[in-house]
Image (cartoon, helix red, strand yellow):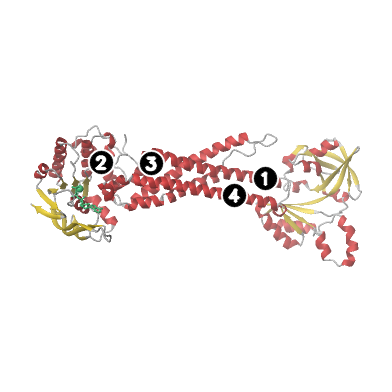
Amino acid sequence: MARPKLPFEFLVALRFLREGRMQTALILLGVTGGVAVIVFLSQLISQLQATIIDRVLGSQAHVVMRPLEEVNLRASTDPASSVLIEPRAQRLRSIDQWEAMVKLAEAQPRVVAVSPVVSGPAFALRGRASKSVALVGVEPDRYRRIVKMDTYMTRGAFQVDGTNAIIGIELAKDLGVTVGDKMFLRAAGGRDELLQITGLFDIGNKDLNRRWVFTTMKLAQSLLDLPGGVSNIDITVADIFDAQEVSERLQAGSGLTVESWMTTNSQLLAALRNQTVSNNLIRGFVIVIVALGISSVLVVSVVQKQKEIGILRAMGTSSNRVMGIFLLQGGLVGFVGALSGVALAWGLLQFFSSVYRTGDGAPLFQPQLDTGIALSAALIALVVGVLAALIPARRAAKMDPVQAIRA
Amino acid sequence: MNAIVSLRGLRKSYGIGTPVETEVLHGLDFELAEGEFCALIGPSGSGKSTLLNLIGLLERPTSGELAIAGTETRGLSEQALTVLRGRHIGFVFQFHHLLPAFSALENVMMPSIIEHGVATAQAEAVAFDLLDRVGLKGHEHKKANQMSGGQQQRVAIARALSLSPRLILADEPTGNLDTHTADDIFALLREFNRERGSACLIVTHDPRLAARCDRRIELVDGRIARGD
Ligand SMILES: Nc1ncnc2c1ncn2[C@@H]1O[C@H](COP(=O)(O)OP(=O)(O)OP(=O)(O)O)[C@@H](O)[C@H]1O
Ligand SMILES: [Mg+2]
């Protein structure tokens, strides 16, 4: 047997833990369970939230600029001229000086992509089938930075020119067309054009797969009777949660209607926030319970080790070092429990991600563990362990060595 | 000769401020010289253990002066008392009081580990040597609770000696041992006292052993009744 290498406090703390085998095992189990629950829940919720946001933003711009709402226009116009305005309400309106607005948006900090879009209602016709669609005229090079169309393409590339069009797989199915076929498009105003289908996309959303028809901006402008105009400007920001701030700034700077995904999806966001709050509540409770567990086990241990503490004191151990020994026990239990807790959480993630699958068989969430979450859980467990040991450690430090020796 | 222990008017009361306040030691004057081998005798409850704990700096006197190795202890901080205790005093208790989670060797090294923060090679060599001297060669790695009472008391003596303290305080070190083992343990203390010059203050109820000490102090009802 080799001479013990550890510093005094570590040596004694470890021996004490090893001696109280059953207690140590129980409190380690408690910490492991607590850490696993926290890590697993946090991971699960952050992933599910990320997936939900991803799905929502997968087909939506972070920020959209539009012409001022009709309501606003009416309110600011005198009743006499409302007769003039009524028919215009039916018609699409372009953003005034949209090129300047694009520049304005591009100049904003944290804006990474800006894409002018011409969109409006139309009907797709083939044979006797007639489907209501949304005609979307874009510059593909700009638009692919708003919605990642390239990743959604199932046939062809996300490129348009002339009378080429890209449609969703559902519309293709409904009309019985595919790449290479032709399709007749009639805008609400009555203008029409025969389009050549050059690509199919699957955006993961049946409704959009049925509605969106991409063409060049130019074609959309002429079909929708919006010469040289655009109906909206789509914007991507660096951090999705910057969207609201960017949109407010743009609103003030442009005088247009500017909406962020956070406003459009405010109910979803509120739900996500509630979920985060309840997750934090659960975490808080688990931490308190684990801390109480560590604390109570160590309090018992201090009483049991009364004699040893007295002996150590008689041999020249200061009360501060006795305190250190018990704080260390708390810290060690917290740390080791955190490691095994993270391991357990990892195992749970593997298990549940293989059990729970979405309708199409893909895992509902990914089994990877976020290093940040794991590290912060481990750190919290360490700190909680030490804090939980504070009361027992102070009791140990205050213990009268004579009392222990006389007994 | 210099005094390793020196007390003047030492008093100790328990339960101060409560209805059951009692004075256990009523003003003791006494000196123990360096290297002296002294027995502390007296009837049960006379205050022998209390006196030993005071000298061992485990408790503070209610009043009076107490100097260890020339250092007056009144007014010293808890920390300073701990240092003084660790540096100069070795304890041997009646109920051996080893650390059960540690081996015999580790128990003997413990005072040095406390002093230096880690186990040094030198401390290990000293511990091996001491265990050999108390007749426990080959038992170094046994846990305390795997040894007999006499063996445990030998380990405790080796431990008390491991830092070569100038003062050894032994409270009934042979109290729960048979006569033969008691004689062995006593002989060991005497041997180390002669060899290293550690002063010993030994509480005992055994008149035979007391007779073999250089000096005897008798406590009766918290007073020194006889000291030669
Ligand atoms: N913590 C305490 N509180 C109150 N009284 C105490 C305390 N410790 C000791 N006493 C009392 O002090 C007196 C002396 O006790 P002490 O243990 O010093 O006697 P002793 O001479 O060692 O006896 P023994 O030979 O039985 O070991 C006893 O009456 C005891 O009841
Ligand atoms: Mg006694």
Residue type beneath disc 4: Ser
Q: Do labels 2 and 4 share a chain?
A: no
Q: Residues within 10 Å of mark 4 (few under 14, many from 20)?
A: few
**Picture coordinates of residue B194 (x, y %)?**
12, 44
Q: Label 2: few (<14), some or many (≥20) within 10 Å?
A: many
Q: How far apart are marks 2 and 3 (CA)?
A: 21 Å
Q: Which of A124 and A218 is in front in this view?
A: A124
**Disc 2 vs disc 3: which is toward the camera?**
3
- Distance of mark 2 from mark 1, alpha carbons? 64 Å
Q: Which residue is drawn at 41% across and 49% down?
A: A389
Q: Mark 4 points at which residue?
A: A278
First in sequence, mark 4 or 1: give its number: 1
- In this view of the protein, which residue sits in the foreground, A50 or A24? A24
The residue indicated by pointer 1 is A52
Both on one chain, marks 2 and 3? no
Are dots 4 and 1 on a single chain?
Answer: yes
CA gap, disc 1 and disc 3: 45 Å
Q: In which quarter of the image is the N terminus of chain B?
A: bottom left
Task: Tell us which disc is closer to us: 2 or 4.
Answer: 4
Q: Mark 3 points at which residue?
A: A17
Up-down relation of residue A299 to residue B24 (above or below): above
Quick check: marks 4 and 3 in contact, CB under 8 Å?
Answer: no
Where residue B108 is drawn, which disc sits there?
2
Tag 4's secondary structure?
Answer: helix
